[in-house]
Image: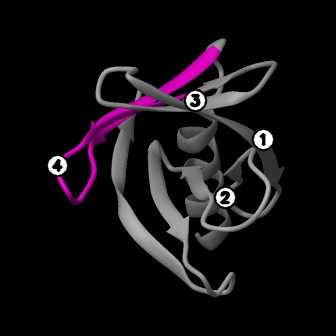
Amino acid sequence: MKSLIALAALLISNSAFAADTLKCEGPLNGGTFVEFELPATGNATLAFDYREFVIDMNCTTFAADIPVTECVEIIPGGNKYIVQVGMNQAYVSQESNDPSVRIAKGTLSCK
């Protein structure tokens, strides 16, 4: 039974990755509207306020029972934005001054 549930979760999470570009959007906790795009090739982008400010991100996919893709803002130094994608949702956070602590910014719905 556990294997069946894991297989179902895997199929559901991978269905969003079957398209050329995964798109997620919604408001962050502070109300700012955000769009996240993860193309099949190239850098992912996190865009704020209807693309007035756009961040390029590098992504890595971690294979597990339920695969998760983590994208990190491409800038030197700290306080980078991080997006973790899995199960048709994107979790947006930002590094604090302490790299081991992340500040939750909000959850986006993916299509």
- Horizontal placement of 3 versus 36: left or right? right
Q: Does the magenta portion include 35?
A: yes
Residue with the mark numbered 2: 66
Write down the residue under mark 1. 58
* N-term-proximal mark, 3 vs 1: 3
Q: Which residue is mark 4?
A: 31
**Residue at mark 3 to residue at mark 1: CA–CA distance:** 21 Å
Q: Residue furthest top?
A: 20
Measuring from the top left, give residue 35's x and y in whole percent.
40, 30
Disc 1 to disc 2, C-alpha distance = 20 Å
Instruction: Give residue 15's mark.
Output: 3
- Give the class, few, some or many, for how many residues have Cα within 10 Å of label 2's Cα (few <14, many ≥20): some
In the image: residue 72, left or right of residue 110: right
Measured in 3D between alpha carbons, the distance from the residue under mark 3 to the one under mark 4, in whole angstroms, is 28 Å
Which kind of residue does numbered mark 2 sit on?
Ile
Q: CA distance from mark 3 to mark 2?
A: 12 Å
First in sequence: mark 3 or mark 2?
A: 3
- Rendered residue at 75%/19% (across/down): 40
Q: Residue at x 66, y 58 (%)?
A: 66
Amino acid type, mark 4: Gly
User: How packed is label 1: few (under 14 Cα within 10 Å), some, or many (20 or more)?
Assistant: some
